[in-house]
Amino acid sequence: MNQYLIIGSGVASISAAEAIRSKDPEAQIKLLSDDRHGYYSRPGLAYYLTGEVPGDQLYSYPPQAYKLLNAKFLRGHATRILESDHVVEVDKGIFNIPYDKLLLAVGSYALKPVVPGIELQGVVKLDHLQDAKHIIALAKKSRKAVVVGGGITALELAEGLVANRVKVHYILRGDRYWGNVLDETESKIIEQRMKEDRISIQYHAELAEILGKNGKVVGIQLVSGEQIKCDIVAVAIGIKPRLELATASGITVDRGILTDEYMQTNLQDIYAAGDVAQSLDTASGKRVLDTLWDPAREQGWTAGLNMAGVKTPYRKSPAFNVTRLAGLTTTIIGQVGGGQDSDIYGIARGDSETWRDIPDAIVAQNGFNVNRLRLMVGEKHIMGAVVMGDQSLSTIIQRIIANQMDITPIRAKLLEQGATIADVLVKYWTELTLSNKELAPTSIYQS
Amino acid sequence: MNLHSLFKRDVTRRTVLTAGQVVPDPIRCVQCGICSYSCPINIDVRQHAWLGKPIIDSHCLTCGECVARCPRGVLRFEQIDVFKGAD
């Protein structure tokens, strides 16, 4: 009987366990994690903060699915892998777990700014369910918060705090929100909506120090010397893959754990998936980090199949994320532009490095305030898109990009001044799918 | 909202009630559970989204609560051809 050990309890772990179980009904599967809340929807924390969903609802896996998975869940912190013995040391040797195949899906953690006062009570981040519970409890006795950082998480924190009746002041180092993914108009749309939600935004503001009294936050000081009173400082300046276990065990790392296209690390029988993995993108030949839910699930699934002996390469889909930015559903697909975001170091959560590849493309755009579509039109293909508001087109565009469909017949029309991009795309897609039924999407999660 | 869109909405609604089902797009889903939480008859919509299956539960009212509340546009109504196979 094969023994599989999965370290981590996020979606990559669960997906890997499902894949293993689908191929090896007799296998002994163990999941080891130091998160006492186990598996839950990490992106759902944003909606827990806003009160749209209760905390208990975030546990997404129903009892019958756990029964089918038939895996053993263990609490503990893996401190070292003894590769030659095929054993994982837990809590510095309190107990050891043997394995035949091992998966590292330990995720990432939120970075904190290196400033005086960062250890004060009232400085919060949004990494775990525990953090979200802490924020909600803290909000009850707080009046004003300052949000520092960028990307999706900063906005989720700002909106979550507003929903909990805390006045929010958002400081940005640059002159606009999420400048390395969104274009200027898109940033302005989101900022306008934030302001409508009574979030005050201050540009060109850099945190210098968090001010405290009796161990608690009482305000911040900016580099300019300006002081702002607040009870909470919420930080979202980016994340870092958890590499301690890998580096302590001789696994090759760069920004994440390096894997080949089968999600295997440099060590035999040890695999990595999810936020922690810097996996090989066979299309570009680069090894990239993703901090998105669906790639984590796909990587976990692929790793699980390979661990169970079914050799399956990981085929990275174009980076794809749907998120709600200031109440506006937004889909970001593929490569959407260059730019710099001085509020994020490295990569933000809900982000992909692919988005920042500058494609050899022209921007064609359409729409107005709350429904906006931006396409990156390449020579033969659509390279990327941002769909804000109405989402009816986003699935079509995602498939056009994922299938690298030749858009030569409609390229000129798309780039015409005042083109109705949506109509052109829908017509193109309808004609194509009528003649080619195989373009219909298929799920990879089939046993 | 103009008059045309008001009537159009009504037609769409009737079509959905008679011949529609809720279909998920799994790659958009992050399993937050707002859909299952909003369902008035406690269908675990989220699990359908995880498995990539349409909501084929015969109890589904096609009320649209899950479709409307999903923050990531995972769910949509799809028309099913109720007369399929009859000809």
Image (cartoon, coloured by chain):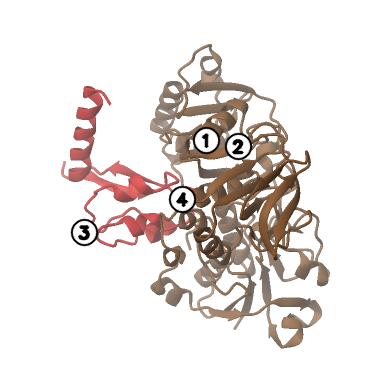
Badge 3 crowding class, 10 Å Cα cut-off, few under 14, some 14 to 19, many 20 or more, is few
The N terminus of chain A sits in image quarter: bottom right
Residue type marked 2: Ile
Alpha-carbon distance for marks 4 and 2?
Answer: 17 Å
- The picture places residue A276, in percent across and down from the top left corner, at 69, 60
Badge 4 crowding class, 10 Å Cα cut-off, few under 14, some 14 to 19, many 20 or more, is some
Under circle 4, the secondary element is helix
Alpha-carbon distance for marks 3 and 1?
Answer: 42 Å
* Res. A32 mark: none
Tell me which chain appears brown: A
> Which residue corresponds to mark 3?
B59
Res. B57 image quadrant? bottom left
Labels 4 and 3 touching (C-beta < 8 A): no
Residue closer to the observer: A420 or B65 = B65
Labels 2 and 1 touching (C-beta < 8 A): yes
Comparing marks 3 and 2, which lies closer to the viewer?
A: 2
Alpha-carbon distance for marks 2 and 1?
Answer: 7 Å
Instruction: Name the N-terminal-most of marks 1 and 4.
Output: 4
The residue sitting at 43% across, 77% down in the picture is A67
> Which residue corresponds to mark 2?
A201
Q: Mark 4 lies on which chain?
A: A
Labels 4 and 2 touching (C-beta < 8 A): no
- The picture places residue A29, in percent across and down from the top left corner, at 57, 78
Alpha-carbon distance for marks 3 and 2?
Answer: 47 Å
> Where is B78 relative to A73, above or below?
above
Q: Mark 1 lies on which chain?
A: A
Residue type marked 1: Lys
* One can see residue A397 in this view: no
> Which residue corresponds to mark 4?
A163
Tell me which chain appears red: B
Q: Mark 3 lies on which chain?
A: B
Q: Mark 2 lies on which chain?
A: A
